[in-house]
Amino acid sequence: MNREKLELEFEVRSSPSVLFNYLSTPSGLVEWFCDDVNLKGKDKFIFIWEGEERVATLQRKVSGKYIKWSWDDEEESEFFEFSINKDELTGDIALIITDFADEDEVEEMELLWESQVQDLRNALGV
């Protein structure tokens, strides 16, 4: 089955530094993304949902702007990332999420991310 790359953009009313904290730290991620996160070393993140664990390796991080992981159980070419983009003209902050999904699950994955980002907005108080 073919996997499709998704790039989703959401407006988030937050400062980039506060938003990045929610995207990159275990305490921030449990507020909206997963039930729990454990760190193993400096680059292994163990994400936990309803008792199920998935391990991801931190690939790249630019403080306040960007964080990228690869799932240890997925194809090497697949990853998920959060990128913060500030519009220089308006000052609006956009969260850009890149992820992959089976072609028959794209719509479901988009809905899941919309729900997750709403949880993020709630955690941010916006």
Image (spheres, helix red, strand yellow):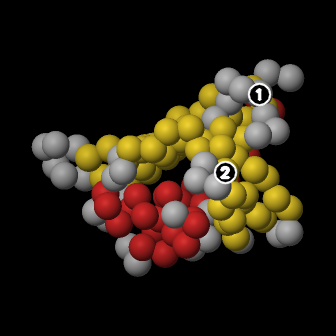
Tell me if I can see residue 110 in this picture: no
Image position of 55 (left or right of 32): right
Query: What residue lies at 76% left-to-right and 40% top-to-bottom?
Result: 72
Residue found at the far front of this picture: 41
Q: Secondary structure at mark 1?
A: loop
Do the residues bearing badges 2 and 1 touch, measured as CB atoms within 8 Å? Answer: no
Q: Amino acid at mark 2?
A: Lys
Q: Secondary structure at mark 2?
A: strand
Could you classify mark 1 by the number of other residues whose Cα lies within 10 Å: few (under 14), some (14-19), or many (20 or more)?
few
The residue that label 2 is drawn on is 44
Could you classify mark 2 by the number of other residues whose Cα lies within 10 Å: few (under 14), some (14-19), or many (20 or more)?
some
Residue 99 position in % (x across, y down): 62, 38
Image position of 87 (left or right of 55): left
* Res 125 quadrant in image: bottom left
Query: What residue lies at 83% left-to-right and 69% top-to-bottom?
Result: 50
The residue that label 1 is drawn on is 75
Q: Is residue 115 above or below residue 110?
A: below
Q: Amino acid at mark 1?
A: Glu
